[in-house]
């Protein structure tokens, strides 16, 4: 209950970041800039280990993997908070987890372990239901990762996603509510906090307002395959005990900020804990680009959410 109260007050920081930068014409982030002098040493000390996770069918070793980033410093048992990172790219194969390597390194330099997930997407063997099975399998493999690296804390952890990855992240944090016959049910690992970065958190609304990428990944419109939307649409799978921070740029034309606003409103209507952070003048890719003026704020919110120090963040 204490953590939920602290997450809810994050709404006080709405609109604190201004200016847009760091995005290509199609809304994807540009490559991250080099680290600052103050952070370079910590970034160099980050270690990266690749895990291949099993899937419900024949795994693809080139896609069914996740990189674990470990920060420098002491590695005592149960001392390093884990952040699961899920990249976006419209659930399609053009963009992959390597896009988030600089982002993961920056988070690790802040003292977090980062589990950066790759998965099959539309155009590379993914789509319905493979993409969602892959994310569920990657999350469940955290149990094995923790056995190999006992310094991780995995009992109260954070999942972060950008764009399509944000939808997968929020859904991944509520899989424990799914029926046994639904995709991704009966999780072995359950993230208990979520940060959504420019996520389509109301998939029915987005699909009926021009987002054909959702129609593609789910194989139909909400009227064509309503049961699929019911299984994976974040706004239809709210867990009032799972706090969510939804960050969104105000000039995002790829995923409208209305998605985050509708989701947060519905969580609050159901008595849950969710906070909307609107980043003034930031577009879809800028929210995760190191060239953007919002970048440090995004990293701050993720770090604070991971470490449950949001009272201190809001007091800044």
Image (cartoon, rainbow, N blue to C red):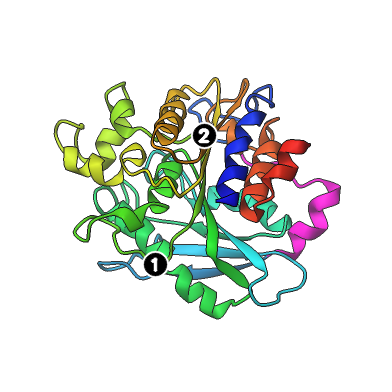
* Left or right of 138, for residue 161: right
Q: Residue 304 placed where, x, y %?
A: 67, 48
Q: Quadrant of the rendered structure where residue 291 is? A: top right
Q: Which residue: 41% across, 63% down?
A: 138
Q: Which residue: 20% across, 40% down?
A: 219
Q: Quadrant of the rendered structure where residue 263 is? A: top left
Tell me how many marks there are. Answer: 2
Q: Where is mark 1, residue-wise?
A: 61
Q: CA distance from mark 1 to mark 2?
A: 25 Å
Q: Nearest the camera: 303 or 155? A: 155
Q: Which residues are magenta?
A: 31-46
- Kind of element beneath mark 2: loop
Q: Is residue 47 magenta?
A: no
Q: Is residue 284 above or below residue 67?
A: above
Q: Residue 127 placed where, x, y %?
A: 27, 48
Q: Where is mark 2, residue-wise?
A: 28
Q: Earlier in the sequence, mark 1 or mark 2?
A: 2
- Kind of element beneath mark 1: loop
Q: Residue 56 placed where, x, y %?
A: 27, 67
Instruction: Say if residue 196 shows up in the picture.
Output: yes
Q: Quadrant of the rendered structure where residue 157 is? A: bottom right
**Quarter that holds the C terminus:** top right
Q: Residue 259 placed where, x, y %?
A: 42, 28
């Amino acid at each position: 209950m204490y953590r939920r109260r602290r997450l809810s007050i994050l709404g006080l920081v709405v609109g604190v970041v201004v200016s847009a930068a760091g995005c290509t014409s199609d809304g994807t982030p540009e490559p991250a800039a080099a680290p600052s002098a103050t952070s370079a040493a910590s970034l160099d000390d980050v270690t990266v280990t690749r895990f291949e996770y099993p899937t419900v069918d024949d795994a693809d070793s080139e896609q069914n993997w996740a990189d674990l980033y470990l920060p420098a410093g002491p590695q005592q048992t149960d001392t390093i908070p884990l952040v699961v990172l899920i990249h976006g790219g419209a659930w399609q194969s053009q963009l992959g987890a390597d896009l988030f390597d600089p982002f993961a390194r920056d988070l690790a330099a802040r003292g977090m372990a980062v589990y950066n997930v790759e998965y099959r997407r539309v155009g590379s063997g993914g789509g319905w239901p493979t993409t969602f099975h892959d994310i569920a399998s990657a999350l469940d493999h955290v149990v094995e990762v923790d056995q190999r690296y006992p310094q991780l804390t995995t009992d109260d952890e954070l999942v972060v996603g950008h764009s399509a990855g944000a939808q997968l992240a929020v859904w991944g944090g509520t899989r424990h509510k799914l029926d046994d016959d639904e995709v991704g049910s009966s999780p072995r690992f359950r993230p208990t906090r979520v940060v959504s970065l420019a996520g389509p958190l109301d998939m029915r609304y987005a699909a009926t307002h021009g987002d054909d990428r959702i129609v593609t990944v789910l194989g139909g419109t909400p009227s064509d395959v309503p049961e699929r939307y019911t299984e994976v649409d974040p706004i239809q799978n709210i867990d009032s005990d799972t706090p969510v921070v939804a960050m969104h740029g105000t000039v995002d034309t790829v995923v409208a900020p209305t998605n985050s606003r509708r989701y947060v409103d519905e969580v609050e209507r159901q008595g849950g804990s969710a906070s909307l952070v609107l980043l003034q003048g930031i577009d879809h890719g800028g929210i995760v680009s190191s060239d953007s003026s919002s970048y440090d704020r995004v990293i701050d919110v993720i770090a604070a959410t991971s470490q449950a120090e949001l009272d201190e963040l809001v007091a800044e």
